[in-house]
Amino acid sequence: MLLKKIQDHTSVVGVIGLGYVGLPLAVLQAKNGYKVIGIDESEDKVDRVNQGHNYILDVKNEELTQAVESGLLVATTDFGRLKECDVVLICVPTPLTLNKEPDITAIVKVTQHIAHQSHPHMLVVLESTTYPGTTEEVIIPALTKGGLELGETLFVAFSPERVDPGNKAFKTHNTFKLVGGATPACLEVARSFYEQSIEKVFPVSSPRAAEMTKVFENVFRSVNIALVNELAVLCDRMGINVYEVIDAAATKNFGFMAFYPGPGVGGHCIPLDPYYLAWKSKEYDLHTRFIELAGEINENMPYYVMGKLQRILNEKKKCLNGAKILVLGVTYKADIEDPRESPATKVMELLQKEGACLSYADPFTPSLVIDGKQYKAVDLTADELAQCDCALILTAHSAFNYDMIVQQASLVFDTRYGTRNIQAPSKNVVLLS
C-alpha cells in the first residue's frame, strides 16, 4: 500500500526541519508532485515559507514560489499534522555540547512527536548526521513502542544528507544518495521513495553502515585539512609557500588530492561530525586518536592566525591592542550566506579579547555578534582599506576586489589565498605561510 502511494505520488511527505537540508528537500519533493508538509519550531521560517520568501541559497526562488502557490508545500509549527504524513524525513540540527559530545536532543524530541502521530504504513527516515547506531538505538524503539511492526507496518531508514551549500553543480536531486534500511522491506520502501526524485540511490546493508559512511566522509576531510594546516605552520617556519607546495603536488597524475589550509574549519559537518564518531568509539574501548588529533590541529588554527597577525604587526612596529583590523569575509566558506561554525567568528573573538579595533566586510552577512558585541558590515571601499592597519582575509568571496585590496591596504594578511590572481603581486601581502 505504501509503495503504491509513493510510486504514484499520492503519499504525503512530512519534512521536519526547514533549514539548509530540509527546505531544499521539501521543495524538491513538491516539485516532483508530492504534497509536502514542512514542520519547524521557528515561526519565522514557517511564515517565510508560506509567503514564498526564500532564505536558503540552494533553493531557487521561483521553485519555492511555485511549490507554495500550487498548494503542494505548506509549512507549520504544528507537529500534530504528522498524522497526515505517509513519509516523514527528519532534518534537524545535531550540534555538539560544550564538552564536544553529541547532542541529539532534537532527534529525540521529534521522534517522540512522530511516535504520538504514527500510524500503519508509514516511512520514517533520519537524514540528520549522527553517530552510528542512532537509528536503531533511539528512533526504532520509540516508534515501535505503540505496536507498529518494523518492516511490516512501519518502515525506518537512515539516509544521510549530503548538502554542500553554494555548490553550483551538485544539488539535492543530483547528489548521489545513500540509504540504509532497518530491514530489507524498509530498504525497499525508502529506496523507492528517493528514486522518485534523486538521480542515483545507493543501498547499504543497514542504517548503522549508512551512519558510519556519513561521518567517515567528513572525517576524511577533517584529517586531510588538518594535515595541510599542520604543513602550513611548518612551511611558515621554514619560509616556504605552502600553496606552491600543494599546487606542485597536485600536478601528480595519481594518488594525490589537493586540500588547502585556512584559518580553521567551519560549517555543520567538518567541525562537528568527527567528534560523533570519536565519542561513540569509546563505547567499544577504542580511542580514535587520529580523528581527535585532526580536530585539535584544526581548532588551533584561529590561534595560529592571531599569533601570526600579532607577529607581522610587530614587524611594522604596531601593537595588536588598538590596531584597526578590517576582516574580509565571515561566513565559513566563500560565496554563501552560511555562518555556522565559521572560523572567522573565532578569530574575531580572539582579536577582540586582545583589544583590536575590529570592523568587517561581507556581502552575505549584514551583521553579527561576537562575544556579545554587535557588529555591522561596512562597505569595502578604498577609504576603509586605507584606514586599517591590516586587511585580514578570512573568507575569500569572489565579490571582493583583490587588486583594490592589495593596492589600498598597507598590510594584507591573506589566510585563504584570495590574492592568488592579483595582477601585480605586492610585498604588503602576507600569506598563511
Image (tube, rainbow, N blue to C red):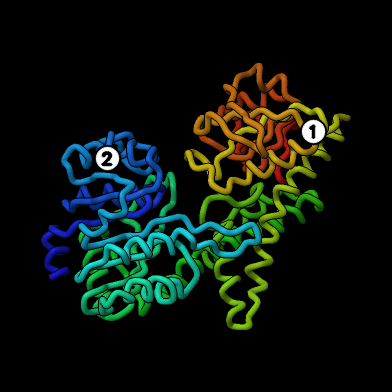
The residue nearer to you, when weighing 351 against 238, is: 351
Q: Amino acid at mark 1?
A: Gly
Quarter containing the N terminus: bottom left
Could you say where residue 349 lies in the image, as x and y percent from the top left?
Answer: 70, 40
Give the side of residue 390 with respect to residue 146, left or right. right
| Badge 1: residue crowd in 10 Å (few <14, some 14–19, many ≥20) | some
Q: Quadrant of residue 307?
A: top right
Could you say where residue 343 lies in the image, as x and y percent from the top left?
Answer: 63, 46
Q: Which residue is mark 2?
A: 64
| Badge 2: residue crowd in 10 Å (few <14, some 14–19, many ≥20) | many
Q: Which residue is mark 1?
A: 355
Could you say where residue 276 lies in the image, as x and y percent from the top left?
Answer: 55, 67
Work out which residue is located at the far top of the displayed protein and give it: 383
Q: Which secondary structure, mark 1? A: loop
Q: Residue at x 67, y 54 (%)?
A: 245
Q: Residue at x 55, y 40 (%)?
A: 331
The residue nearer to you, when weighing 256 against 412, is: 412
Q: Quadrant of residue 345?
A: top right
